[in-house]
Image (cartoon, helix red, strand yellow):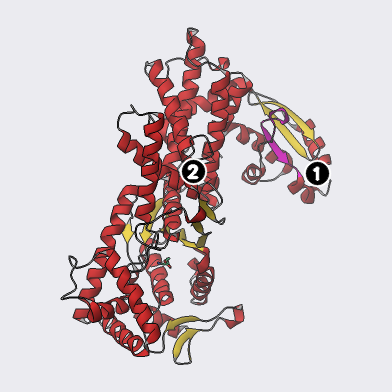
Amino acid sequence: MANPYVEEITQQLAALTEMKAEDLANLIETPPRPEMGDYALPCFALAKKFRKAPNVIAKELVGQLEMGDRIADVKALGPYLNFFVSQGNFVKDVLEKVLTQGRAYGQSEEGSGKTIVIDFSHPNIAKPFGIHHLRSTMIGNALRHIFRALGYEVIGVNHLGDWGSQFAKLILAWKRWGEGELTEDAITIQTLLDLYVRIHEEIENDPSAEEEARAWFRRLEDGDPEATRMWEVCVNVSFKEFDRVYEMLGIDFESIAGESFYQDKMAGTLERLREKELLKVSEGATIVDLEEWDMPPLIALRSDDATLYSTRDLAAAEYRWETYQFDQLLYVVDVAQSLHFKQLFKVLELMEYDWSQRCSHVVFGRLRFKDGAMSTRRGQVIFLEDVLHQAIELTREIIEEKNPDLPNKDQIARDVGIGAVIFADLDSRRIKDVVFDWKEMLNFNGETGPYVQYTHARYCSVLRKYGKALPPESVAYDLLNEPETLAVVKCLEQFPVQIQRAAESHEPSLIATYLIELCTVANRFYNAHRVLSDQAAVAEARVALVYAITIVLERGLALLGMKAPEEM
Ligand code: ARG
């Protein structure tokens, strides 16, 4: 724990309670109201150890703690021990840290030497681009930034859905209705989608079409050149579209290894399953029976020996372990696949891989549009790219209205429009369903991405007006003593802890919530106190604070994958 106050508190408590300072640090809370102090220790967790009521423990400890440079006062309040830190030092310690560390503030080395693999985004090629891939993309990318800030080596993997029977169906569809050879110039993603819908209808009415599709999939799995070539065309066409979206979002991957990548690795996986005597034949299919754990079986091979999504996931997990020796492997996938991941992790455990414990399903809820408000030019399917363009267009309209003379409008409309989408996705706990409401998410005064970006831009403009080098040379920290000002400093001090918590709980929303909180206390300060005035010392101290706010806002937005324009 980097915070010197918490360190002092927990060191003293550790000596008194014979508990570990780290464990105590995890118990420390921030009291809800300033008059209750700066930090609090709830004594419930100590009750068992000391066989005393928590309020008795709190009273006993108060008498034994020593006041000093950092701790100004301690009070027992019911079952809580409330600590008051010495303020002069507090402001100086926090701000000096932000100002000297700059953009590195909040970063740490705690993850150094450890690798985290994040499986995220993973859209399905030649299948309708599910809107849930938007969530996976945003959440996964934010986690990537968050873990990287903590010094982890992060491997973002795009496990593209680029293998499976849907390709055989597309090939069949082209064979039936396509004109000439299937080439990249002959089709668009829309054609693929139309073909996909059409062949599905066909298969429903005509079982022989289903048979034919199966035969194509067999050819594909056997490496037949014609099937492979056609498959490749579909992949390339779709990927070009995805790439545009990734570019707009500023996202890249350390590894793009889709399902097809495991084509030659599944035989080995099946072999190992067989060696562990985990495979069974049931109704012609090869399965791993999971009845003992109250789950349906994991199907490893279909009755026609075709591989499945699960088979590829088993091979992928093994490959990732071999390749990265990860500390954690995170699958950022929507809640609909919870059972799939339970089965997957159970089978890995049955294969006696102790690293199966390091795998987690980072689950998230659904996303929908309020009143079907996403009008799309392309029919029922919602394309990610259309969503982003719509956000940019709407932002552009707002800017035209609010600030028509803004230079660089296009870029800012992009940064803010896309930022609004990202923030709306990330600002509540990921398990919750998200409803996109354009009006709400683009509201510059609501709890939105544009609000955070706007607050940042506003303080940047204060700094521009100040006009001198930043941070100011000598800062009289003791002038920063009003309650609104202290509230900001306290919030700034929380940033590193919030990053750690977001990483621990795989919850980028903690950063989003934190940013809203920071904007709220910052604006309260700003409304109560004039920053630039002719009282030079006061002005410089406040400028230092404003500068620190812009640093943390910019860094926080970056963790979520958002830009922080300096003007808007
Ligand atoms: N492409 C899949 C889908 O859209 C998600 C892939 C998730 N990752 C994985 N390793 N299974 O359903």
Which residue: 42% across, 58% down? 118
The residue type indicated by label 2 comes to Lys
The earlier-in-sequence mark between 1 and 2 is 1
Tell me: residue 539, above or below residue 214: above
Q: Can see residue 421?
A: yes
The residue type indicated by label 1 comes to Pro
Q: Between residues 163 and 298, which one lies in front from this camera angle?
A: 163
Q: Which mark is residue 536?
A: none
Q: Between residues 323 and 540, which one lies in front from this camera angle?
A: 540
Dot 2, how many residues are within 10 Å of its Cα: few (below 14), some (14-19), or many (20+)? Answer: few
User: Which residue carries the number 1 mark?
Assistant: 54
Tell me: residue 155, above or below residue 493: below
Q: Can see residue 565?
A: no
On screen, residue 74 versus residue 53, left or right, reads: left
Q: Which residues are magenta?
A: 33-43
Image coordinates of residue 332 in percent, x first then y, are 46, 60
- Quarter of the picture holding the C terminus: top left
User: Which residue carries the number 2 mark?
Assistant: 439
On screen, residue 540 versus residue 232, left or right, reads: right
Image coordinates of residue 567 in percent, x first then y, are 38, 29
Q: Quadrant of residue 561?
A: top left
Circle 2 — which element? helix
**Residue 38 colored magenta?**
yes
